[in-house]
Amino acid sequence: MMTNAPLLLWFRRDLRVTDLPMLSEALATGRPVMPVFILDPETESIGAAALWRLGLGVEAFAATLERMGSRLILRRGPALDVLERLIAETGAAGVFWSRSYDPATRPRDEAVKAGLKARGLLAQSFPGFLLHEPWEIETGQGGFFKVYTPFWRVASKRPVPPSLAAPAFLPEPPAWPQSDRLQDWNLGARMRRGAAVMAPHQRVGEAKALARLEEFIGQRIGAYGEARDMMAEDATSGLSENLTYGEISPRRIWHAGYRALEEGQAGAEQFLKELVWREFAWALLHHTPHIAQSNWKPDWDGFPWGMESDKAEAWRRGMTGEPVIDAAMRQLYVTGKMHNRARMLVGSYLTKHLMTHWKIGLDWFADTLTDWDPAANAMGWQWVAGSGPDAAPYFRIFNPATQAEKFDPAKTYRRRWLAEFSRDPLALSYFDAVPKSWALDPARPYPRPIVSLEAGRALALASYAQRKA
């Protein structure tokens, strides 16, 4: 094998050059490197908002590579087929990539590795998406954790390797193969008119992710523990969007948060716990992949949740008549994100007050979140529904009205997103984003509640009691 043959660097959800083990290991070989992004069926099947936001990330990453004297080759098709064609075109020695852990993409990666190795080519995967590999945090008996708190105790004491610096340049191959044009892929097609509304709310690319982290550590981490639940405040890091596409590494975030902890910043430990909560979700998805689509606890399979209904559709459209629920659902449709406290409230309301299956919510979030994370989405929905690991007790039912008074006491969040009460430009933009077929009009009166909070709670508790019996 020629030592000057290039290496293909298969980028996926790792759109950065700082602290990327795959890139550092490739450069250490001394070979030229050829960055590649593949629009394969597994990638193309993700939700509308996530696919659109991924396209923005790919565009920003390509620009970063060009500034470094390199480029990003775009190809479409099954991953192994595309990589084999590129190897034939370029004489590449093989392929490096960052590991993927979800059940939708692991079989693809295993097939690629087996196919390339069978031809005597280099085929190597590297960590980079998590602080620790999902199999590394173990119980004393060698199993995996099913409860977060002991997981945190072990993970928080495990050393995190230092971040790797970004290279100054990437060695180019003698010639570049042809590349698809990103605009021809039309990754935002399913967004329709919503893309223009959602675009201003995204902070895309590695540079903006690093700036976002610096801003949060410098200005807001001290108050994070108390302020993170206040829905109208800009108190969180907002980094979930960038973590999703690998525009920043979790190690970079961990070390910044840990320095703040050592400096005595009050909210730093809680911030680190949230980062490790993400690790916990991915560890569970790795060890119990059925959590992505099925009840983690099989004894919930017979629970009488409903599926599609007019009430579920009202929930999706932010038209339930419950102000904080509707405000949250409209925030999601305008920005592609939702405040974490609001995510718990809309999840509890759907699965308990409306007695609707958590998969309805899981699928809607997968289609509309720009920070969609398959592990966090699955664990979050099953946590709030009661069917998952370390779940909230089913009988703990969030009351949207009292929660709103506690975490939005001045009604700022609700007014920001409910045009019927405020005519706020943000609230009005929801009606510019939604499908015209919904025929929504901000001039119409705000809807009456589709379910009484008392009656919804009583039905949920009765169903829970029947299940226990």
Image (cartoon, rainbow, N blue to C red):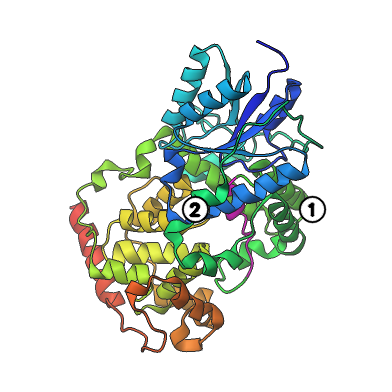
Identify the mark at residue 263; answer none if there is no mark.
1
> Height in image: 2 above or below 346?
above
Mark 1, secondary structure of its residue: loop
Horizontal and vertical percent for residue 166?
77, 38
On the question of residue 146 being in view, the answer is: no
Q: Residue at x 71, y 64 (%)?
A: 220
* Label 1 with label 2: CB-CB less than 8 Å: no
Toward which corner of the image does residue 239 lie, by quadrant? Answer: bottom right
Q: Is residue 75 left or right of residue 461?
A: right
Is residue 162 inside the magenta stretch? no
**In the image, residue 27 lies at what x, y percent?**
74, 26
Q: Residue at x 55, y 71 (%)?
A: 231
**Of residues 387 and 240, which is closer to you in this image?**
240
Give the quarter of the figure containing the N terminus: top right
Q: Secondary structure at mark 2?
A: loop
Which labelled disc corresponds to residue 186? 2
Please state the extent of the stretch shown in magenta in the rendering: 234-245
Among the 4 quarters of the image, the one containing residue 211: bottom right
Residue 303 position in % (x across, y down): 21, 53
Q: Residues within 10 Å of mark 2 (few under 14, many from 20)?
A: few
